[in-house]
Amino acid sequence: MNSHKRRSFLRKTLLGGVAITSLPFLSKGERSFVPPLATGSPPDWKQVRSQFPLTTVKTYLNTASLGPSPQVVIDTISNTIQDLEEQATTGRKISYATHEALGTLLNTAPENIAVTRNATEGANIAARSLPLQVGDEVILTDQEHVGGASPWLALQQQLGIKIKLVALDLTGKTNVQRIKSAISTNTKAIAFSHVACTNGMVIPAREIAKVCQAKGIFCCIDGAQALGMYPIDLEDIQPDFYYGSGHKWLFGPKGTGVLYINPNTMNRIQPSYVGAYSDSVFDLENLHQEYRQVAQREEYGTRNTGITLGLGAAVNFVQTVGMDALVKHQRELVAQLREGVASLPGVKIFSPSHPDFSSAIFTFRIEGHEYREVQSRLNGEQRLYVRGIYEANLNALRVSCALFNSEQEIDLLVNSLNTIVRG
Ligand SMILES: Cc1ncc(COP(=O)(O)O)c(C=O)c1O
């Protein structure tokens, strides 16, 4: 591709809709070129699938663990790295296009967002930023991922805070009530997943955030499974912290995450780590410093602009497909899967059926079959990839229905399960 074409390629695919005044870097090599994703309603799902270099040899139904990237993300990373290395510069300024894109996706101002390494880093930053002391209580749920729960457990060991674990209702219906009932006068924070990694249940984030606001409790939301899979409006939810992964349902680069900090929370917290770009005043001579009052202060020091811009390209990819369209597509696949799985003997379904609480994740167990046995047969015989769920003792299989998955793949899965169960 010549440099003119490449410039427009970058503008269209990476920065779509984002105002940026100059793009100083042009590289010589273009590794590959997939025709840009067509806009259209409804999207052409085959064309969406063709954007992913993901092998056709396997049927990948595990986006909740790791989302494969479309070609535009891979190209953006490698082109950006090439460009920046040629110029020996960090490209920090151009990386803010990603914050703009994330701000639009999540309905918040770009400076309220920091790009992190993963969701776990966001959870750690939240946990370490709060003014917690011995005896303070933090509420967690029994459906948390290790990455969302471990930073709080560490504070229990290191600071002497108390963790209260709330058992969630897997139908989704009574969870707000359950969490509310666990609050005591010592509760200082509630940390929960927006979409549970175990069964894909949606937890009403706005309602819980409202309870937190009314009681002066910090609301910390783990959006690792929601980001890119489910519409998120942070202006509406108003949590104190919201963190997620770039590498799951956003199909972004591995080693990227997103952290939102509410601007109204800034004066109640301390930054966890600090460095260049965290400070508003840095006076070494007088041993004095002050911090910027925005989430972006968490991006201290030199960063990897290649993957940050790759994350921006991923956000624009998802936005081009469209949140409404992808939610509808995912729901149709889950409905097809639910129907197919329900016809199998001895099946126990763990994912809620109510549309307010269901998502693109579907979890079930086949009684009398260890999840590991079914998982390894699907894997070995059909090259079907799903995740086993040992968490919360579910002994179940989790299927992720992402925007690149098809009806044919769900049919293949149901037929294979049929053979395993009946065969
Ligand atoms: C709910 C939840 N939180 C946190 C994580 C950890 O994500 P990361 O690898 O981005 O830190 C996961 C990963 O599956 C998850 O499902």
Image (tube, rainbow, N blue to C red):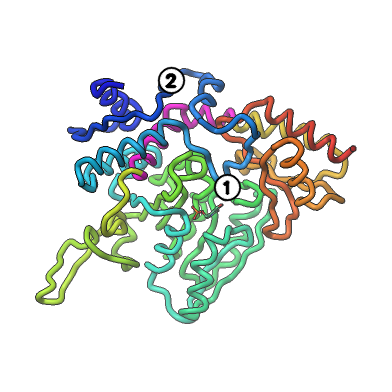
Q: Residue at x 63, y 42 (%)?
A: 361
Spot the residue most to the right. 423
Residue 5 rendering spot, x and y as whole percentages? 28, 20
**Element on which disc 2 rests:** loop
Give the amino acid at mark 2: Thr
Residue 31 rendering spot, x and y as whole percentages? 38, 30
Give the amino acid at mark 1: Ser
Q: Residue at x 50, y 63 (%)?
A: 190
Residue 119 rendering spot, x and y as whole percentages? 46, 54
Q: Residues within 10 Å of mark 2 (few under 14, many from 20)?
A: few
Q: Residue at x 84, y 39 (%)?
A: 420
Q: Is residue 380 left or right of residue 161?
A: right
**Are the two marked residues, 2 and 1, in contact with CB atoms closer than 8 angstroms?**
no
Q: Residue at x 47, y 49 (%)?
A: 245
Q: Residues within 10 Å of mark 1 (few under 14, many from 20)?
A: some
Label 2 or label 1, whichever lies nearer to me, is 1
Q: Is residue 186 visible?
A: no
Q: Which residue is mark 2?
A: 39
Q: Which residue is mark 1?
A: 65
Q: CA distance from mark 2 to mark 1?
A: 27 Å
Q: What is the span of residues highlighted in magenta in the rendered image?
A: 307-329
Up/down of 96 relative to 215, above or below: above
Look at the image and tell me in which quarter the C terminus lies.
top right
In the image, is the residue at mark 1 within 8 Å of ligand 1 by its beta carbon?
A: yes
**Element on which disc 1 rests:** loop
